[in-house]
Image (cartoon, rainbow, N blue to C red):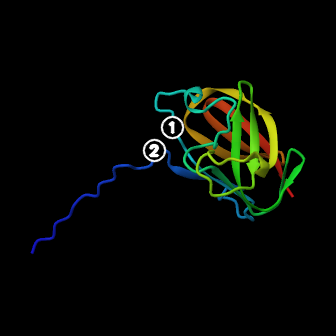
């Protein structure tokens, strides 16, 4: 009896694949501090303003709300954030973005966002880049002992400095 092989049908693959940003970067041998898990929507001939609503809460990515998992306490904008799991939301405006850490977890999008669960909320300036990013991206950096979370999509860039406690 001949063996018949059929190719898998991969229709419906996620258009906004999941990714992680880790701090410190995984190439350093040290204790984990933070992992951000998020989905990476693509521009696909659209603009940031076409996709992300101005003056409304955004899940800061696609699909599930972006998750921040802390293995150590950190400080952002003079607020201590205890080790644990949180969601990240943002509210884009013309010149700045409100950055939010919320204690609710396992949320799809921003549909059930509740500001009563916010543990941090502050505004950061938007910077415009010269080079466009096709996929929404999050990365960590550490220069001169100042750690930062970087966010970028299309020409929009913003960053959130933090300190490991």
> Distance from label 2 to label 1 (Cα)?
8 Å
Give me the disc on residue 15: 2
- Asked whether disc 2 touches disc 1, contact meaning CB atoms under 8 Å apart, the reply is yes
Going by the image, does 68 lie left or right of 119?
A: left
* Closer to the camera in the image, 78 or 55: 55
Residue at 9% x, 75% y is 1
Left or right? Give the position of 139 relative to 143. left
Residue drawn at point x = 62 percent, y = 49 percent: 65
For mark 1, does the 10 Å Cα neighbourhood hold few (<14), some (14 to 19), or many (20 or more) residues? many
Q: Which label's residue is closer to the chain start, 2 or 1?
A: 2
Residue 10, x across and y down, in percent: 34, 53
In this view, the residue farthest toward the bottom is 1
For the residue labelled by badge 1, is the local secondary structure a helix, a strand or a loop?
A: loop
Q: Is the residue 26 above or below the residue 92 in the image?
A: below
In the rendered image, the quadrant that contains the C terminus is: bottom right
**Looking at the image, which is closer to me, 151 or 9?**
9
Q: Quadrant of residue 121?
A: top right
Residue for badge 1: 42
Q: Position of residue 35 (x, y in %)?
A: 68, 57
Residue at image location 69% in from the left, 44% down from the top: 89
| Nearer to us in this view, 144 or 150 | 150
Helix, strand or loop at label 2? It is loop
């Amino acid at each position: 009896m001949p063996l018949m092989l059929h190719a898998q049908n991969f229709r419906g693959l996620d258009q906004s694949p999941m990714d992680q940003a880790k701090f410190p970067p995984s190439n350093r041998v040290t204790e984990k501090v933070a992992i951000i898990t998020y989905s990476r929507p693509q521009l696909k001939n659209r603009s940031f303003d076409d996709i992300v609503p101005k003056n409304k809460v955004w899940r800061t990515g696609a699909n599930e709300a972006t998750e921040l998992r802390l293995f150590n306490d950190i400080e952002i904008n003079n607020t201590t954030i205890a080790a644990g799991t949180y969601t990240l939301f943002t509210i884009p405006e013309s010149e700045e973005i409100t950055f939010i850490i919320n204690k609710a977890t396992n949320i799809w999008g921003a549909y059930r966002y509740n500001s009563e669960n916010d543990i941090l909320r502050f505004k950061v300036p938007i910077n415009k880049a010269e080079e466009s990013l096709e996929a929404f991206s999050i990365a960590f950096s550490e220069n001169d002992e100042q750690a930062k979370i970087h966010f970028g999509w299309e020409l929009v860039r913003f960053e959130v400095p933090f300190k490991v406690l």
